[in-house]
Image (tube, helix red, strand yellow):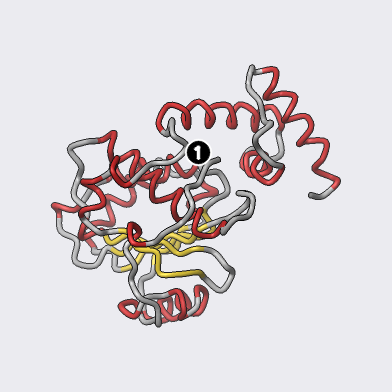
Amino acid sequence: MEKSHELELTQMRKSVEKLGFSTEKYGDPTLMRFLIARSMDADKASKMFVQWLKWRSSLVPNGFISDSEVPDQLKARKIYLPGFSKSGFPVMIIQGCKHYPPKDQLQFKKFVVYMLDKTIASAVKGREIGNEKLIGIFDFQNITYKNVDARALITGFQFLQAYFPERLAKCYILNMPRFFVSVWKMVSCFIEKATLEKIVILTNEDEKKSFIEEIGEEAVPVEYGGKANLRAIQDVEVPPLEG
């Protein structure tokens, strides 16, 4: 850890204690994600960290979400982990045509945690959980009006921003149909500027080639012009992510 950040980290640890919580279980890399998300302001980072602790203990009391807690969402087999990008980030693909607005919103929220936790955990491999980032890909090929779910998209991005700070490396959107553009504009209003800057909407073949080049053929599934296989998230075994 850079010496220049030691002061902010110390201040943040003290600030969290003043709020009645402890940072004892968490290393500097975890705290740094909250500091970076709050422009190195120790007090703001502390508040964000405490909100995260409260949220986590409420929604994820066991430390992780098990497959048995999200059966309806897993049944659709709509999330895939094909591998790692050139930069070493795990790639997560969401196929929108297999998603339908959920009847059980709590289960869907748990599913968002399940997929983000599992994607991040696939990069950890026994090391301390620190600054691992992920690359998200939304594929809107063949979606119809029945698949449109602005609420689900807003929930996903708000969770990323509030509870998974500095986890998103980049997000690509593929095959967005014209009818979805207005939906996306509305969803974008709920996404912070820093997150929006990481989102790339692919609109032509040149952009698609750049996308494959940036991620690397080994992590882009054959269906998208690469060499990887689509692996459903529930078929990928990783150690449970805690923290």
Q: Quadrant of the C terminus?
A: top right
- Residue at 63% over, 22% down: 21
Question: Which image quadrant is residue 181 in?
Answer: bottom left
- Residue at 20% over, 42% down: 102
Number of marks present in the image shown: 1
Question: Which image quadrant is residue 53 in?
Answer: top right
Q: Amino acid at mark 1?
A: Tyr
The image shows residue 226 at horizontal and vertical percentages of 40, 81
The image shows residue 154 at horizontal and vertical percentages of 35, 42
- Residue at 41% over, 75% down: 220
122, 13: nearer the viewer? 122
The image shows residue 196 at horizontal and vertical percentages of 48, 52
The image shows residue 153 at horizontal and vertical percentages of 33, 47
- Quick one: label 1, few (<14), some, or many (20+) residues within 10 Å? some
112, 60: nearer the viewer? 60
Left-right relation of 89 to 223: right
87, 60: nearer the viewer? 60
- Residue at 70% over, 17% down: 18
150, 225: nearer the viewer? 225
Secondary element type, mark 1: helix
Q: Which residue is mark 1?
A: 163
Left-right relation of 106 to 205: left
Residue sticking out furthest to the right: 3
Q: Is residue 238 above or below residue 57?
A: below
